[in-house]
Image (cartoon, helix red, strand yellow):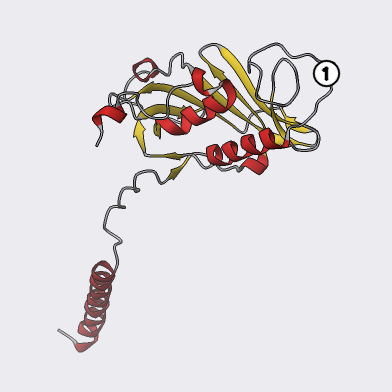
Amino acid sequence: MSTGKVRPRLVVVWALFAVLVGAIVVVETTDILEPAPPAPTGSLPMFEFTEADLGAVEVIYRGRLGTLMRDAEGQWFRHDASHSHSDGAAADAAPEETETHRSDPKAAAEVADQLAVTARMLADRRVPLEQGPAAYGLANPEVMIAFYRRGADGADYSRPLEVLYVGDLLAAGYTYYTRREHDRELSLIPRYQVALLLAQIFGADQAPTPMPEWSATTDP
């Protein structure tokens, strides 16, 4: 065998050996082959907007419609029969189109605070939709929440930024099955995050309690 044929083979062998050593170093010093760890509970953001981006939020709850809106000055109010921008009237009452709007700064600040919390809503987990929507209470959900962009005069109703459907509670009563409009998976949302928004719109006496009613007597 001639020396001229051996040398190219040795070069190839050493090149392959160098590649192998490099691969071993990468595997040993990085987590490139490790599966990504699951996200911590309550760390999965639901929305990409903030309260400042919103012009209106419409909620259907058990067949009733409630709306939080901004006026032309950017102040929040609960749309009600009197158009007084206060929270004293029923959220689903028929509006009076000729009523003069008078913003209530305290009520507006309370709505803004609640929507700031809602916009930061976090899911505990995402899970696949393994059965039909009816199995999770999402075929005809009792709660539908539509978020609309802020416009020049209050809200832009051309299309919602996001729509969230809220289905059944899980067996323990602390978490809702939910689904965003275009998702193929479910998001598990803590009960209180939904309950607080419903209480802001419909009143605490008309909304679910933030925690299961029996939890106060059974939890330590």
Q: Position of residue 199 (x, y in %)?
A: 53, 25
User: Residue 131's quadrant in the figure?
Assistant: top left
What's the residue at 54%, 40% (across, down)?
117
Question: Taking 120 as reference, is 30 left or right?
Answer: left
Q: Which one is in front, 121 or 91?
A: 91
Query: Of all residues shown, which one is farthest toward the left?
Result: 1
Q: Residue at x 71, y 27 (%)?
A: 158
Apparent side of residue 52 relative to residue 64 in the rendered image (left or right): right
Name above or below for residue 143 compared with residue 151: above
Q: Left or right: where does residue 212 sit relative to residue 45? A: left
Q: Name the one closer to the observer, 196 or 189.
A: 196
Residue 141 coordinates in the image, percent (x, y): 46, 17
Q: Which residue is mark 1?
A: 99
Could you tell me which residue is drawn at 75 percent across and 21 percent down? 83
Question: Percent from the top left, x then y, of residue 39?
Answer: 35, 48
| Residue located farthest toward the front when viewing the structure as drawn | 217
Q: Quadrant of the N terminus?
A: bottom left
Q: Is residue 40 above or below residue 170?
A: below
Task: Give x and y (percent) for residue 149.
Answer: 68, 35
Classed neighbour count for the residue bearing mark 1: other residues with Cα under 10 Å, few (<14), some (14–19), many (≥20) = few
Q: In the structure shown, which secondary structural element does the residue marked by tag 1 occupy?
A: loop
Q: Amino acid at mark 1?
A: Glu
As displayed, is residue 166 above or below residue 53?
above
